[in-house]
Image (cartoon, rainbow, N blue to C red):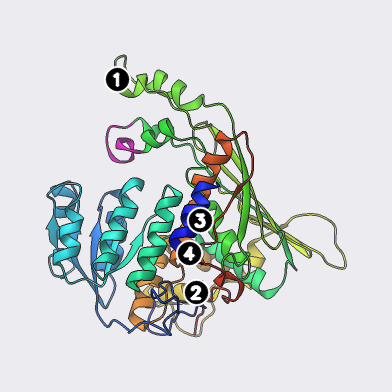
Amino acid sequence: MDTANSRRDFLKHGTSLGAAVTVGVANLTAQKSDGKAPAGAKPIELVRVGFVGVGEKGSEHAANLLGMEGVELRALCDIREEACAQTQRLAKKLGKKKPTAYTRGKRDFVRMCETEELDLVYTATPWEWHVPVCLAAMRNGKHAATEIPAAITLEECWQLVEASEKAGKYCTMMENVNYMREEMAILHMVRKGLLGELVHAEGAYEHDTRYLKIKDVGDGLWLGDHHAKRNGNLYPPHGLGPIAWCMNINHGDRLDYLVSMSSNARGMDLYAKEHLPAGHPKRAKRYINGDVNSSLIRTVNGRSIILKHDTDLPRPYSRTHLVQGTRGIVRRYPQFEVCLERKAHGNTWEPGAKFLTEHEHPLWKQAQERAFRKAGKAEGKAPTAQEIARISATITGDFLEDFRLIRALQTGVPPDFDVYDAATWSAVSALSEKSVADRSRPADFPDFTKGKWKTNRPVQILGV
């Protein structure tokens, strides 16, 4: 199928863990323009990185990269000189080369991509800049990685897919939740068959972010604008990402269509009125994004997924990660609990702690072993459950996602996420907006893989 025509038709009709860790996945992120997937990528011994957007989140990623062997943070780009200077000081402190700063305005990342010899361009900018940065990177022969969501509109999703295929470069979306301990243990349980055949899953981004949106710094400079202009599920990857791995989305199954409904928008207007002084421009702004959005997705293979977005009302943080199959059900919030079909089945939740230990993902086992060695724990002496919990609390999903990406490039294999994941997971936002505006009528997902989902093997996160 011709990609450009299919897009138009659719729019018209609606190393820190050590060298022992490796990556195995089914298909390469980028496809050559002839539609054939290369067998692999040439290993990159020293990964040269340019980072765009070194704010609160970006500086965390930059610090991770500076601490990894075989990585050179060669360039930084931000509209604030001090943000770049802060990361430059950290590089000096760690004995690394000073990265070049690009601070000549919002599009100076283009100059960086055109002039710097880089292998990877990584961005943690406001959402609307993710696609422009990734496109500039790939068009200049660099791999691209972006914070979530990768794109806002369906057109942008297709732009990423087409640019990746044309350039033969990876375009990966970085989802830290997929690497968190409980989510990876659940994935391990699913792959072992403990839940039987998967039938249903639920995920969410339920996080009171009103205080962020009214700020005049950081996320407050741009996040509220999306809630004032759009109405749908604006931040789906946290909820959908781990589910997509469990259900092999784009790797044996595919998202087919969704229906979406939003509640009234009341929370942000009320919060701004009560927390901002008279005359403040954000107090006069009107927010249209529903306080709670619920989207129901059906896959081609007949599974159902519920995704929620709830960020403008008082509530505890949750991601409502739930996976249900013919032999059991697991949920992550409000705590980690498991209910499996057994001989003495009592239809009750069991504490997830013992399952977490028994079904610890190999990647997490290796991360824990490394942490124990650094802490001086004697080899051969089994750690206690308390020691495992203490050490595990020091391991972050952000570090693991950065590490996995770098190791993929160093070993010449595809990253855990590909451009089709980036497009598919991000498309939920645009399709939910379309459905909400159309009285919750169904909206179809494009097949960004152009049929390859039928033969792609499940993503493999292997520890050797």
Q: Disc 2 residue type? A: Leu
Residue linked to disc 3: 425
Give me the disc on residue 363. 2
Magenta stretch? 215-222
Q: Which residue occupies 56% across, 26% down?
A: 264
Question: Which residue is more in the foreground, 20 or 72?
Answer: 72
Q: Which residue is mark 1?
A: 280
Image location (x, y in percent) of residue 364: 50, 71
* Nearer the camera: disc 1 or disc 4: 4
Per the image, label 1 sits on a secondary structure element best described as loop
Separation of residues labelled 1 and 2 (CA atoms)? 48 Å
Asked if residue 459 is among those painted magenta in the image, a careful observer would answer no
- Answer yes or no: is residue 121 visible: yes
Mark 1 or mark 3, earlier in chain: 1
Secondary structure beneath label 4: helix
Amino acid, disc 1:
His
Compared with residue 63, is residue 309 higher up or lower down, i.e. above or below?
Answer: above
**In the visual, does 350 lie left or right of 247?**
right
The residue sitting at 57% across, 54% down in the picture is 445
Give whichever of 139, 217 is nearer the camera: 139
SS for tag 3?
helix
User: Which tag, 1 or 2, sits closer to the chain's start?
Assistant: 1
- Magenta span has 221? yes
